[in-house]
Amino acid sequence: MQPEFCDFQGFYPFYLSQHQNLICRRLHLLGITLGLLSLLTVISLRNWIYLPLPLVLGYGCAWIGHFFFEKNKPATFNYPLWSLRGDFAMMKDMLTGQIEL
């Protein structure tokens, strides 16, 4: 049974508990970066056939981190929008030194 959350402040500690492995967190950072760069490239080139690429790069890196290093099911499967927000919050926390990078 999955826990229920009322707000992001309640969700984020759970999200972090699912990302304790350093390699998993680094793969998330890589995936977010590659996903954003590829999204900006697709938009700037207006080549919409490549629009799935940011999702493949972003989620591919993150899911490799979960399945092979963290050895858990990605929170995205049950909490897609809050997990996306959690990705960016964790990225900010890693880049500002609040979470080990």
Image: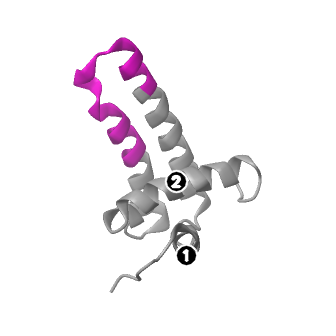
As drawn, the label of residue 10 is: 1
Dominant secondary-structure state across the stretch colored magenta: helix
* Residue 82 screen position, x and y as percent: 44, 61
Whether pointer 2 and pointer 1 mark residues with C-beta atoms closer than 8 Å, the reply is: no
Q: Residue at x 36, y 13 (%)?
A: 45
Relative horizontal placement of residue 92, taking residue 1 as reference (left or right): right
Mark 2 or mark 1, whichever is nearer to me? 1
In the image, residue 74 sits, relative to residue 44, either above or below, namely below
Q: Amino acid at mark 1?
A: Gly
Res 98 → quadrant: bottom right
Relative horizontal placement of residue 19, taking residue 95 as reference (left or right): left
Q: Element at badge 1?
A: helix
Q: Is residue 31 magenta?
A: no
Quadrant occupied by the N terminus: bottom left
Read off the magenta span: 40-60
State the residue position of label 2.
87
